Amino acid sequence: MLDTPRSVAEAAERIGFGRVERAFRPTYSVNIISVTMFLGFGAAFGVAASTITKPIGILLFAVLTTTALLLAVWAVLDTWRLIRRRFYLCEGGLLTAEHLTRLTRMIAWDDIAEIRRYYLRWYTDNGPQTMHRCRLRLTDGTSLNLEKPPLVDGQDLCEEVERRSAKARMPHILHALEAAGRADFGAITITPDGVSSPGGYALWSDISLVRLRRTRLQVWTHDGRKPVSVLIRHVPNLLNVLMILRREGLRMDLRFYRTA
């Protein structure tokens, strides 16, 4: 568990975010590997240069050695920057900081207009691999990718950000649904009578099951159709969608979605 500096805790109280509950940091193992790799290249090129007698060869390997060492220095500086980056989860919002204490963003839960939390999936010789992603769009139009680079226990942070921002956002969504007769969530549209996607439309009374997997949300009807089947990366504020579907009393299989 990372400590919270006193200045950050005092700042959180001062701006109305309350207590800092937990601090998160990026992973930097990849950066350490990069440093080692560039230093290895620099050493190899340096040794090779010492065995060459032709001026052009010496010059070439000198350039390669210098480039590798400069890249190693850059990787060291970047690693130091990541080591000192923090995300502070507070009762009332999220603080981001550089150098442990220099606050760069103060994000209240109702400042988050959209959150997209999804998994990238690909296949290797060792089987399917997944990578978690969490992207925010704030009400002022700026964007923030919480998991780039990945965080230590980053999924825990993103789940809390999603849960708390969804709760703050829900009254506005319900008001829009009542006033405009629809609420849009990227590839999904919800109306007072049902839910639709580019693949079709289903009335609430026709839906037999809502199923969520790591990468896809599916809505099944009693007659075996699947009018809604969309990648969750194309559905902003997915938790709000699930909250509305749950309000309709639908049967839901959400085993891969801990937030819901």
Image: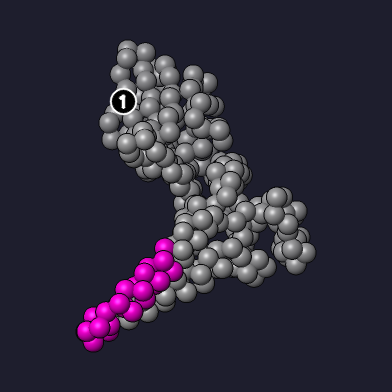
Residue depicted at 46% across the width and 59% down the height:
33
Q: Amino acid at mark 1?
A: Pro
Image vertical order of residue 232 relative to residue 228, above or below: below
Relative depth, front residue between 84 and 42? 42
Residue picked out by circle 1: 227
Is 231 inside the magenta-drawn segment? no
The 10 Å Cα crowd at callout 1, few under 14, some 14 to 19, many 20 or more, is some
Dominant secondary structure of the residues highlighted in magenta in the image: helix
The reply to whether residue 114 is in sight is no
Q: Position of residue 161 (x, y in %)?
A: 58, 47
Q: Position of residue 17 (x, y in %)?
A: 71, 56
Residue depicted at 52% across the width and 21% down the height:
249
Residue depicted at 51% across the width and 38% down the height:
240
Does residue 160 appear to the left or right of 249 in the view shown? right
Look at the numbered disc 1 and give the secondary structure of its residue: loop
Residue depicted at 70% across the width and 50% down the height:
1
Relative depth, front residue between 174 and 250? 250
Q: Position of residue 226 (x, y in %)?
A: 32, 22
The reply to whether residue 26 is in sight is yes
Q: Position of residue 38 (x, y in %)?
A: 41, 67
Image vertical order of residue 80 relative to residue 230, above or below: below
Does residue 202 appear to the left or right of 137 in the view shown? left
Is 47 inside the magenta-drawn segment? yes
The image quadrant that residue 216 belongs to is: top left
Q: Which residues are magenta?
A: 37-60
Image vertical order of residue 82 relative to residue 180, above or below: below
The image quadrant that residue 26 belongs to is: bottom right
Q: Residue furthest top?
A: 223
